[in-house]
């Protein structure tokens, strides 16, 4: 019997989508309670900039799996909130490099702490070996489709 025989509601994408949405909602509530001035979508852009500051908008698109209009809108809003700034690349002025401002850098510690708390809450009764198997399976699924 093939591995893709599921009952209604048991599709991987449905289950992972529900889990992802539940985690995102919980994290947004924590951000709101702490009065952090970002949405989950904006935070995901900041997250990539905390990993590597000064990357292009196209690199943000690739890293976050978002299209150009979505990244442009998110960066516009982050720029208005003074969390990032656009700088034209020295080699090609058509390319905008996105840099964190001091305010954007200062959000990292508190927001990452809240993200860790949220993930720990989500996984609190899941054995570590099951988490590892899940990560491995999802990586294989992703690799198969990339």
Image (cartoon, rainbow, N blue to C red):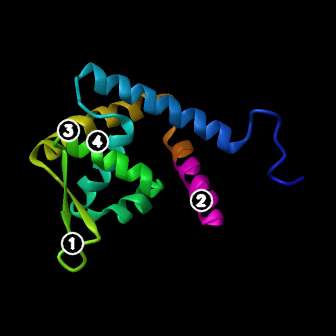
C-alpha distance separating marks 2 and 1: 32 Å
Q: Position of residue 140 (x, y in %)?
A: 61, 61
In the rendering, which numbered label is found on residue 81? 3
Tell me which residue sits at (66%, 43%) in the image: 13
For numbered disc 2, what is the local secondary structure?
helix
For numbered disc 3, what is the local secondary structure?
loop
Q: Residues at badges 3 and 2 in contact (C-beta under 8 Å)?
A: no
Marks 2 and 4, the one that precedes in the sequence: 4
For numbered disc 1, what is the local secondary structure?
loop
Task: Bin the neighbour count of mark 1 within 10 Å (Cα to Cα): few under 14, some 14-19, many 20 and up.
Answer: some
Above or below 140: residue 115: above
Instruction: Single out the mark in the foreground, 2 or 4.
Output: 4
Q: Position of residue 61 (x, y in %)?
A: 41, 59
Asked whether the viewer can see residue 130, the reply is yes
Residue under label 1: 89
Task: Bin the neighbour count of mark 2 within 10 Å (Cα to Cα): few under 14, some 14-19, many 20 and up.
Answer: few
Asked if residue 143 lies in the magenta stretch, the reply is yes
C-alpha distance separating marks 3 and 4: 6 Å
21 with respect to 86 (left or right) = right
C-alpha distance separating marks 1 and 4: 21 Å
The extreme right residue here reads 1
Task: Bin the neighbour count of mark 4 within 10 Å (Cα to Cα): few under 14, some 14-19, many 20 and up.
Answer: some
Instruction: Single out the mark in the foreground, 2 or 1.
Output: 1
In the rendering, which numbered label is found on residue 77? 4
Tell me which residue sits at (22%, 23%) in the image: 35
C-alpha distance separating marks 3 and 2: 34 Å
Residue under label 2: 142
Above or below 89: residue 67: above
Image quadrant assignment for residue 93: bottom left
Marks 1 and 4, the one that precedes in the sequence: 4
Marks 2 and 1, the one that precedes in the sequence: 1
In the rendering, which numbered label is found on residue 23? none
């Amino acid at each position: 019997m093939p591995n893709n025989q599921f009952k209604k509601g048991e599709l991987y994408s449905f289950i992972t989508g529900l889990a992802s949405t539940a985690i995102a909602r919980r994290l947004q509530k924590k951000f709101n309670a702490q009065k952090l001035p970002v949405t989950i979508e904006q935070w995901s852009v900041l997250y990539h900039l905390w990993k590597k500051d000064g990357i292009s908008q196209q690199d943000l698109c690739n890293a976050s799996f978002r299209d150009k209009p979505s990244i442009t809108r998110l960066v516009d809003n982050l720029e208005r909130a003074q969390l990032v700034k656009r700088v034209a690349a020295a080699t090609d002025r058509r390319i905008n490099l996105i840099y964190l401002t001091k305010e954007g850098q200062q959000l990292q510690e508190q927001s990452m702490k809240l993200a860790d708390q949220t993930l720990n809450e989500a996984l609190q009764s899941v054995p570590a070996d099951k988490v590892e198997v899940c990560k491995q399976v999802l990586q294989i699924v992703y690799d198969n489709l990339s």
